[in-house]
Image: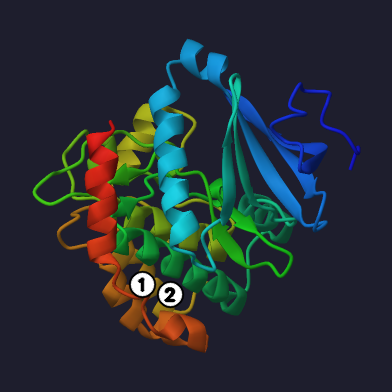
Amino acid sequence: MDGNTRGGGHSEALKNYNLGTTLGIGSFGKVKLAEHKLTGQKVAIKILNRRQMEIMQMEEKANREIKILRLFSDFIHPHIIRVYEVIDAPKDIFVVMEYCNNGELLDYIIEKGRLQEDEARRIFQQIISGVEYCHRNMIVHHDLKPENLLLDSKYNVKLVDFGLSNVMHDGHFLNTSCGSTNYAAPEVISGEVYVGPEVDIWSCGVVLYALLCGSVPFDDEYTPNLLKKIKGGNYILPTHLSDLAKDLIPRMLLVDPMKRITIREIRDHQWFQNHLPRYLAVPPPDTTQQAKMFIRNFLSKL
């Protein structure tokens, strides 16, 4: 750590932290490694520049992410990034989060080439648990991909980046676009309306394929061809996959969202159940009423 916070003009707002190296740079801010002065705990601080957000007309996206992250600071889950505090300053917003020192799942997949089935299953079980928790709290992540799945010191998954997330509320459908086309469901890229959870399930299916195969099922340098492949559900299952994996992936990558497998059915699938840790064997507690209260407050402020 560099021992001070003066370089970026954040000394007063971040007086409790020593800023370190830059972990990443985004469209309207950066993420820096930091250390809490009193406890010595390492954290990641997302710095959102208000002026840059205004120029790029991204204030709504950032505000949505902050509100959703604040929700998860109340409802703690082992596989969703923990938010410790949000600091408002005149020029910037600082989101102090859990630090995951093993980086993005994408880099891990690239390093490994492809994961052995037992390791892929362990990671996938954690992803599904986190996504299920989001859905229980009326949140659709909407941008699930290995870049938005971080690995902590024990290579456990943490869901991050809720900037494209949507809130679900009774009687309403969604029709917003996606973050990464390769992981987007057919109904999303076609501009159709959808409920929400089913698009996350499709993306989880693409992530599972990437874990087991080291590549995405739908890929093409020519975007119209890529869209055609996704809309048609055209991909190849490698022969090295187990029979159970070959059964699960196609059920997640069904073009018809009404026929697509649900999270409950994924949980019950034999491939998923194999070596399922005890702490993930029970679905998360039902916080629907709390979530609906949050959604009402959330919508009233939009």
Alpha carbon distance from label 2 to label 1 = 5 Å
**Residue linked to disc 1:** 248
User: What residue is at 46 percent from the left and 31 percent from the top?
Assistant: 62
User: Looking at numbered disc 1 in the image, what kind of residue is underneath it?
Assistant: Leu
Question: What secondary structure is found at the residue carrying circle 1?
Answer: helix
Q: Is residue 105 left or right of residue 41?
A: left
User: Looking at numbered disc 2 in the image, what kind of residue is underneath it?
Assistant: Ala
Quadrant, the C terminus: top left
Labelled pair 2, 1 in contact (Cβ < 8 Å): yes
Can you say whether 233 is above or below 220 in the image?
below
Q: Is residue 71 left or right of residue 262?
A: right
Q: Write down the quadrant of residue 155 in the picture.
A: bottom right
Can you say whether 30 is above or below 122 in the image?
above
Residue 289 appears at what percent x and percent y?
A: 22, 63
Residue 301 appears at what percent x and percent y?
A: 28, 33
Q: Write down the quadrant of residue 263 in the picture.
A: bottom left
Quadrant, the N terminus: top right
Regarding residue 186, the answer to whether it shows in the image is: no
Residue 189 appears at what percent x and percent y?
A: 29, 36
Question: What secondary structure is found at the residue carrying circle 2?
Answer: helix
Regarding residue 115, the answer to whether it shows in the image is: yes
User: What residue is at 16 percent from the left and 40 percent from the top?
Assistant: 193
Local crowd size for mark 1, using a 10 Å CA cut-off: few (<14), some (14–19), many (≥20): some
Q: Is residue 162 left or right of residue 171?
A: right
User: Is residue 128 or residue 79 the one in the foreground?
Assistant: 79
User: What residue is at 33 percent from the left and 50 percent from the top?
Assistant: 234
Local crowd size for mark 2, using a 10 Å CA cut-off: few (<14), some (14–19), many (≥20): many
Q: Is residue 234 left or right of residue 65?
A: left
**Residue linked to disc 2:** 245
